Image: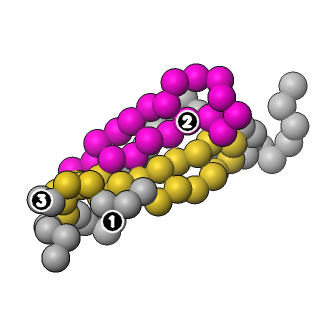
Amino acid sequence: PNGDILGYEVTCEQLHGGGKPRSYQVSGDNAETSLIVPNLIENVPYKFKVQARTTQGFGPEREGIITIESQDGGALS
């Protein structure tokens, strides 16, 4: 009823401002599809939004907050 999935749009922005939102297009409907978002800052929370794009248009947004922790687990200097 909602059409075939053609891909996804992923939007990423810092949770508390500090830059323009970045959008990425992901093609296909494979559940194993991944996306690498470059230049994220450690210990800064980001809001990610994902929308499926179908033959009928965009579906509802799904939103999540993610914080990238430092690789060594220690404090940044």
Residue drawn where x is 47% and y is 60% of the image: 62
Q: Is residue 36 left or right of residue 30?
A: right
Residue that numbered label 3 is attached to:
55
* Three-letter residue code for mark 2: Glu
Q: Residue furthest bottom?
A: 1
Q: Is residue 23 left or right of residue 19?
A: left
Residue drawn where x is 14% and y is 67% of the image: 4
* Three-letter residue code for mark 3: Thr
Earlier sequence position, callout 1 versus callout 2: 2
Residue drawn where x is 57% and y is 56% of the image: 64
Res. 30 visible in picture: yes
Image quarter of residue 30:
bottom left
* Three-letter residue code for mark 1: Glu
Residue that numbered label 2 is attached to:
13
Q: Is residue 41 left or right of residue 32?
A: right
Instruction: Give the alpha-carbon distance from disc 1 to disc 3, as whole Å.
Output: 21 Å
Main SS of the magenta part reads strand
Q: Which residues are magenta?
A: 9-27
Q: Is residue 46 left or right of residue 34?
A: right
Name the residue nearer the viewer: 66 or 1: 1
Is 76 placed above or below 73 here?
A: above
Whether residue 20 appears in magenta in the rendering, the answer is yes
Q: Where residue 9 sits: x, y (%)?
A: 33, 47
Name the residue nearer the viewer: 74 or 66: 66
Earlier sequence position, callout 1 versus callout 3: 1
